[in-house]
Image (spheres, coloured by chain):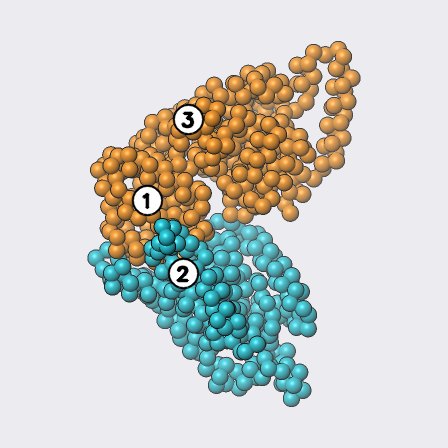
Amino acid sequence: MELDTFLIQVLNGVQYGLLLFLVASGLTLVFGIMGIINLAHGSFYMIGAYLAWSLSQHLGSLALAILAGVVLTVLIGMALEWLLINKLYHRDHLYQVLLTYGLILVFEELRGVIWGNDVHGVAIPEWLGASIRLTDTLAYPVYRLWISAVCLVLAVLMYLLIQRTRLGMMIRAGAANREMVQSLGINIQLVYRVIFALGVALAAFAGMIAAPVSSVFPGMGNQVLIICFVVVVIGGIGSIKGAMAGAILIGLVDTFGKVVEVDIGGFRVLPELAGTTIYLLMAVVLLWRPEGIFGKRL
Amino acid sequence: MKEGNFRSGGRRKFLQDAAVLGSAAALGALAPAIVRAQAQKVKVGLMLPYSGTYAQLGIAIENGFRMAIEESGGKIAGREIEYVKLDDESNPAKATDNANKLVTGDKVDVLVGTVHSGVQAGIIKIVRETGVLHISPNAGLNAMTTTLCAPNMFRTSFANGQVGYPMGKVLAERRVKNAVTLTWKYAAGEESVNGFKDAFAKGGGKIVRDLTLPFPNVEFQSLLTEIASLKPDAVYVFFAGGGAAKFLRDYQAAGLKGKIPLYGAGFLTDGVLEVPGVAAAAEGIETTLHYGEGIETAKNQAFRLSYAKTYKLQPDVYAVQGYDAAVLLAAGLKAVKGDVANTKGMIAAMEKAEIDSPRGRWRMSKAHNPVQDLYLRKVVGTENKVIGVAAKALDYPPASLCKMA
């Protein structure tokens, strides 16, 4: 592989990783702080994409659609926490899995009823529609670089929110000892509701900004969900830093797994086994550090 | 979940059947066998996806099938057709159970289905075991008409390799020197690519590299980068549905469109050109398929008009395949004068049938796959315009791979 191709592939990997981070960060927040395994997380990614598509047709602009979509999904997230999720805090993980799996089915059916089963495309806003020519045959869409920039900004904001604000302090305290925080007069119920809504909105937002490059189609959330769980487990459950490290690692491994050719003893290992590289990575990381790269020691 | 809707009223149906059976038995002593047979309807099991990503395809197939039956007055050889519908959900895990339900539970006379190749594998298992008459209106699994072929199994669509082969032939004839292939790593994609490579290599072309990605992954960026650095003379791909729409747009966004020509199996540009941005990304791309817009035969024009009138929809290749499945069944039934129990007689007639299809006339190969013309099509606006015949009366994979031949 030539150097310029190699560098472009690194760019591809990092760019894919940053988008994965955006989806996975919501999952790790809800998982790590609230202790809720939310299988329906991928559904919100799909809902976000469908919202971006249908709202941008009504509102005439993707930016407005994203704004309205974020407000909508925050409300949906709060309503869900109030209606269903808060019944699960003291339950076994199995109940959480059952309920949130049920939600996947409900959202999938609702999507079919409201938006149908067709594939849709979302137009890239004109001011981001250009491409940068990298080599004589390859160009790089500006929109993809823009996605990366947005993901980076959000990562920094999230870090500041949790480490430097009062709400962040409550969140960290709540994760450590829910009862103690409550007895100190903090409305932990409300804090949890906000976190859940934030997690939902993050997934939906990722779906919205990814919609122009990924297309909008049924079942798109399920593909993302599995990779996100891998990211969260590799990075360390509940760690935002870990989600970032895990996402970038997965992005790079997935990218190079598809294009690097490796033969071992005459058997073509890569790219024949490209589908398994990220799971191999997960296995290796877990053997090395069972709690994940940035996870708390078990 | 859904199948409850389709099969509700099962008990009432059972009672009706029992009554019919009873009266037939009472008449039995007097009436000749042929009349007794005609007292019953012919039971057609439709095992198709009615939910999920492929729901539209299932509906188009059923529409086409019913249209052909209605055109002959709703009866074939004097016998009415009764449908038993079952949603296979494109779920391979439930395939054998579902096929079994129709064959041994509902005792259908003929099993028609399905779209997904994985589900098709389950159907093949059951119909080979039970010997029930079977017509596949879509799934292109090569094995069905090669290594796993059987006298009671027919296909009215295509074999995966049959759609890729003509594109390789066309490119080789144009003296294209080398090509890169790209597809999802699963049966349909690999069989399609192998068909392409077979013809391309025969014509002197060289494959630079076979790229794949896991099904149904749609993160194409690294593969596009690889294509850009390999700089082949042509790229052949197999993608369908949502993945195809995304691929076409990514190919354009990566600046490859117009630099490295893209070719594909017809599914790449079928049913996705209405998606915003895709038509522009696909403009000018050539693909091969056994159907396309602008086949100017009286048969096709009548078919398109009648379909649009009946269903308020434009017909697609799937509707044609469903239509032909019913025409094939009718040919079999007519030959045995409606005596559906005479499977041998029906099979003999179906093997000899020449189908006057909207896609053009075709006949069955010895392996029971269509021997048909494969068209070269070009994307113009939102249409796949037929611009020529890429391979005439193509029998591929060759029927000789089937031990019946």
- Residue found farthest to the bottom: A184
Above or below — where is B228 with respect to A298? above
Q: Which chain is cyan?
A: A
Residue B342 in picture, x, y percent from top left: 61, 18
Of all chains, the one bearing label 2 is A
Question: What residue does disc 3 label?
Answer: B400
| Residue found at x 32% / y 53% | B251
Disc 3 element: helix
- Residue A77, image quadrant: bottom right
Of circles 2 and 3, the one toward us is 3
Q: Which chain is orange?
A: B
Identified by mark 3, the residue type is Ser
Disc 1 element: strand
Q: Is residue A236 visible?
A: no
Question: What residue does disc 1 label?
Answer: B236
- Answer whether labels 1 and 2 touch (C-beta < 8 Å): no
Q: Local crowd at mark 2 within 10 Å, few (<14), some, or many (≥20)?
A: many
Of circles 3 and 1, the one toward us is 3
Looking at the image, which is closer to me, A173 or A73?
Answer: A173
Question: What residue does disc 2 label?
Answer: A254
